[in-house]
Image (cartoon, rainbow, N blue to C red):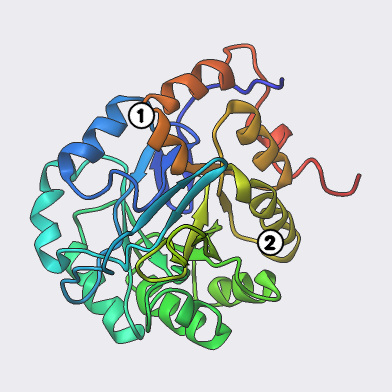
Amino acid sequence: MVSIRPGPVTLGGVVLDNHLLLAAGILGTTGSSLNRILSLGAGGVVTKSIGPDPKDGHAGPCLVVLDDGLLNAMGLPNPSKEFVDEITSLAKKPVVVSIFGGNPAEFARVACWFEGRVAGFELNLSCPHAEGYGAAIGTDPALVEACTRAISVTGIPTWVKLTPNVTDITSIGKAAERGGATAIVAINTVKAMRISTGMRRPMLGNRYGGLSGSAIFPIAVRCVYELYEACNIPIIGCGGVATADNVIEMMMAGASAVEIGSAVYNDAKVFETIKAELYKKDGITPLEIIGCAHGQ
């Protein structure tokens, strides 16, 4: 396997300790859990998505464990503005706050709570199971551009997380770029469902949910590959990354870094494990492989 040289990474305006980030929604609900993941080797962390008002989320069951991934329908539960105090102790660390809203004004309102307290924002324009939020907005290029611009005008690093549940993800990526995004995160979960044949009903309380884990890795690689050819801003690969070889594959498709989510469910030390295999002092520079699969 290809190994790369270790060292800090500047990505979309955010300085990271390495190329591995905690994805939003996984152990990102408290300052202590975020700090723990940083101590376990993550180069940066993304928080649970925070919105304009507190939400309890969907009725359970909210999570189904599958052989090849996770199926969840949490419904964006969050404490809203109260979360600001939760991350006060992490002010100087590579913490990116995931935010959501129903329109550009709501995105801007949430963002203003965290200005000067975080390294950047990740706009959740891709959650597939929250009515009026996430993918409900993220499938419309005009809304994606407007919501992105509402945050990028602040000058704070603005990452936009895209949904794969569209016909052409590049049109959404270009809209985020026009809105001033400093990076694109691809992808969020894939809309899916399972039915219990014994109970004769959907397994999730919300019926539909988002599929993550190794089952969607090939989809994520394809999306990163397409976005790399269509957009000029950095891409962060997300979706099923669980090994050092997965990281290399994502980078060859065009990712400058990756986010890891579902793999943490099985092993919180996955960042340390991947780092040990991914980085070698005599490895190649990351620029030698980012996007190298193109034009072959």
Task: Tell me if I can see residue 183 in this picture.
Answer: no
Judge from the rendering whether residue 55 lies leftward or rightward of residue 105; answer left or right: left
Secondary structure under the numbered disc 2 in the rendered image: helix
Residue at 73% of width from left, 66% of height from top?
230
The residue wearing badge 2 is: 227
Residue 261 x %, y %: 44, 44
Would residue 92 appear left or right of 175 to someone viewing this image?
left
The number of numbered discs placed on residues in the rendered structure image is 2
Number of the front mark, 2 or 1: 1
Percent x, y for residue 231?
Answer: 67, 64
Question: Where the C terminus falls, by quadrant?
Answer: top right
Q: Is residue 234 left or right of residue 91?
A: right
Give above or below for 49 relative to 249: below
Query: Residue 268, located in which quarter of the rendered image?
Result: top left
**Could you tell me which residue is drawn at 32 percent across and 25 percent down?**
40
Q: Quadrant of the N terminus?
A: top right
Give how far across and how far down residue 45 sits, in percent.
34, 43
Report crowding for label 1: few under 14, some 14 to 19, many 20 or more residues within 10 A (C-alpha).
some
Q: Is residue 119 above or below residue 190?
A: above
Location of mark 1 (residue)? 268
Q: Amino acid at mark 1?
A: Ala
Residue type at mark 2 is Leu
The x, y position of residue 8, in whole percent, is 45, 31
Quadrant of residue 131 in the image? Answer: bottom left
Local crowd size for mark 2, using a 10 Å CA cut-off: few (<14), some (14–19), many (≥20)? many
Mark 1: which secondary structure? loop
Q: Earlier in the sequence, mark 2 or mark 1?
A: 2
Q: Is residue 251 visible?
A: yes
Q: Nearer the viewer, residue 11 or 249?
A: 249
Marks 2/1: CA–CA distance:
30 Å
| Residues marked 2 and 1 touching at CB (< 8 Å) | no
Of 11 and 260, the residue lying toward us: 260
